[in-house]
Image (cartoon, helix red, strand yellow):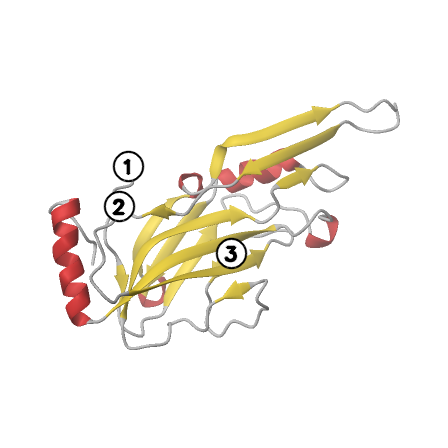
Amino acid sequence: MFKPNATLPPNVEVQTLYDRQTIDGATTSLQFFQPNPTGKETDNFYLNNPLTGDKYQVLLGFGLEFMAQTIKSSANVDPVAIINNLKDAVVKISTNGGRDIALLTPLSQYMNFQQTKVVIAESFSAQEDKTIQATLESAKPRKLDNLFYFDKNERWKFEVKFATGTFPAAADFTDGRLGIEAVVKLASMDDAQLGEYKRRSLQVLGGHAYTR
């Protein structure tokens, strides 16, 4: 389903950026790579949106990870409900203030739900409930089917939208941070490099090589 990228033209700079957003209680969406990030290095790695520099930004691929690999049940934390809410979410990448949709796809295409492990441990005490522990396996960033790029100095939106945004409060999740990490891989190109990359993409991907 995911086709290979064409070979990049010479002297193209490739950068990998990340942004982490915390889930705190009822959450209908998470907004990644917002303008003027204020977080620490442990929260994000990018300078601004739009990105600096007078070049096109070709989206080579992206990945999404749940920030806590293991989720243990507690009074207000239900691991099964959290995973089901994640699996029901969608990823949306858009431009032009959200009016032009570049990508809209289930989150399950980019998170490794197939390898999720759930362990239920019965308590020896009649006063304690059974413990549920869910482990989410990591997934590598995936390439896009088609070539897509952001115009020079263009602002873009990267969102995860939840159909059912019922999550624990951040204060109730004590085993790490409850949230999602988004990673994007971008190639910065000038006009000549983008023209050459389009030509190469047509050879690799066929007549519908790019959506822009």
Q: Which three-letter amino acid code belongs to the residue tagged 3?
A: Leu
Outermost front residue: 10
- Looking at the image, can residue 19 be seen? yes
Real-space Cα separation, disc 3 to disc 2, in angstroms: 24 Å
x, y percent for residue 191: 17, 71
How crowded is the residue under tag 1: few (<14 C-alpha within 10 Å), some, or many (20+)?
Answer: few
- Kindly identify the residue that appears in the image at 47 percent across and 37 percent down: 112
Q: Name the residue under label 3.
A: 30
Indicate the secondary structure of the residue bearing disc 2: loop
- Kindly identify the residue that appears in the image at 49 percent across and 38 percent down: 87
The image's mark for residue 145 is 2
How crowded is the residue under tag 3: few (<14 C-alpha within 10 Å), some, or many (20+)?
Answer: some
Indicate the secondary structure of the residue bearing disc 3: strand
Horizontal side of 21 relative to 63 (left or right) equals right
Q: In this view, does 194 lie above or below 203?
A: below
Q: Name the residue under label 1.
A: 1
- Kindly identify the residue that appears in the image at 48 percent across and 60 percent down: 18
Horizontal side of 14 relative to 134 (left or right) equals left
